[in-house]
Image: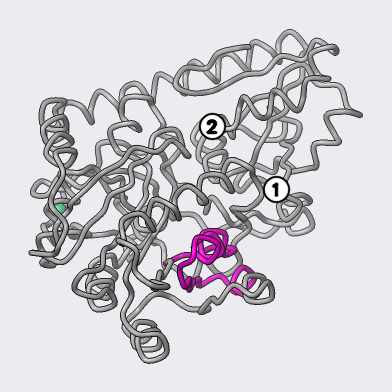
Amino acid sequence: MEHGKYQRKTCRYCETPLGEAFLDLGVQPLANNLPRIEDSATPEFRCPLALVKCPRCHLVQLTHSVPAQLMFDEYLYVSSTTQTFRTHFAEYASDVKSRLGGKERPLAVDIGSNDGLLVSCYEKAGLRGIGVEPAKNLAKDANERGVITLNRYFDAQAVREITEKFGKADVVSANNVFAHIDDIRSVLENVRALISDDGFFVIEFAYLVTMLEKMYFDMVYHEHVCYIGVAALDVFARLFDMELFDIGEVDTHGGSLRVFMQKKGGPRARTSAVDRFLAVEKEKGCLDEGIYRRFADRVLGFRLRLNRMLADFKKEGKTVSGYGAPAKATTIVNFCGFDFRMIDYIVDDNPLKQGRLVPGSGIPIVSSARLKNHSTDYVLIFAWNFAPEIIKKSAYLKEKNVRFIVPLPEPRIL
Ligand SMILES: [Zn+2]
């Protein structure tokens, strides 16, 4: 098997041997490597996309690991593009600050800092902010805007560089990246080395239980290697002499958690939220197999329904386009087998994505101006977490009798 070398044999958290996948989404292209239209004839890299649960710590994870250098070199996702994210990270920085007890100019390091949005929010909140970002283009942009950003992976050398120049960190944060790193054991070890004894580590990630309950299987793509629940994270922290002390709920990606951890025996008391989440996960069956099998069955049912819906529109001579080309669009498009004959084009407001194709499909990504000039009957909102924002700014389509389709948790026409 050509993909055999990418198969993951042991759990990314606890190194227990992994068993069989419970959900197979097929052999898919990389969700964020959007080919340019002129390169459409070049074959794309593909790898199996499937989920397996660790029998010991219960971490849900991908069966295969795609080498990071194939995925993160040029990253087209820019967080500052939406107002939702700008507001979110301003609140995040003030939450972090309020937990530092009036410390003078505390040092906050953000791992996977993207275009530096959170780092600049740290600065505005009175912290010293430093970003670490492997994508060249994003790190360069951030530095040009005066946001200090190390262009590299977060490894032992990055920790040395930061501690020599700036000292130990009072806070290390990682948002929607903690679940994206294959060698996460070394990351936690390095975080531990970077934070001061009274410092803390805060991560934000899309919550496993929300994915299972709301059917958000489109958050599964190669870059997103782990699907984190509190139970698995609790085991993981202990393996590295860390402990969870608080958990908050946020809704950026339709159900995310913000989890705080410190060195074992650190100064912060464990809040009741941690035990509450652990109890709820156990009660819901997240440590058993049944919940995952039921999820997989519902995902297969979803594909049937959405395919039937689009096939019916085609039979009636209607046209379908899409809104939003985030990573999750690649997953739905490829899992459902859509191509440019089913979906004429997908509009996206990020200019970096325009003029490219949705991986594996030949569907072109264009500016939203296309919707004004080209008639379409249905707009399938792949960026469904921004559906209200998208529908509001596309109000002119209503007059043209264009209908919106929100795919998840169940395909529905608005
Ligand atoms: Zn495990």
Q: Quadrant of the N terminus?
A: bottom left
Q: Is residue 113 magenta?
A: yes
Region rendered in magenta: 111-139
Q: Is residue 188 above or below residue 376?
A: below
Residue 325 higher or lower than 7, as above or below? above
Picture quarter with the C terminus: top right
Residue 325 left/right relative to 398: left
In the rendered image, the residue lying farthest to the bottom is 164
Q: Which residue is mark 1?
A: 357
> Which mark sits nearer the N-terminus, 1 or 2?
1
- Where disc 1 sits, the SS reads strand
Name the disc covering residue 21, or none: none
Residue 248 x %, y %: 30, 41
Q: Nearer the viewer, residue 352 or 53?
A: 352
x and y, in percent, of residue 350 in the image: 71, 49
Task: Give the residue drawn at x 61%, y 32%.
Answer: 338
| Residue 402 drawn at (x, y percent) | 77, 15
The amino acid marked with disc number 1 is: Leu
Residues at badges 1 and 2 in contact (C-beta under 8 Å)? no
Q: Residue extending furthest right?
A: 373
| Quarter assignment of residue 277 | top left
Q: For marks 1 and 2, give the one nearer the viewer.
A: 2
Q: Which residue is mark 2?
A: 385
- Please give the name of the residue rendered at 37% of the width and 91% of the height, measured from the top-left corner: 164
Q: Is residue 12 visible?
A: yes
Q: Residue at x 23, y 31 (%)?
A: 292
100 in the magenta segment: no
Residue drawn at x 68%, y 29% as measured from the top left: 390
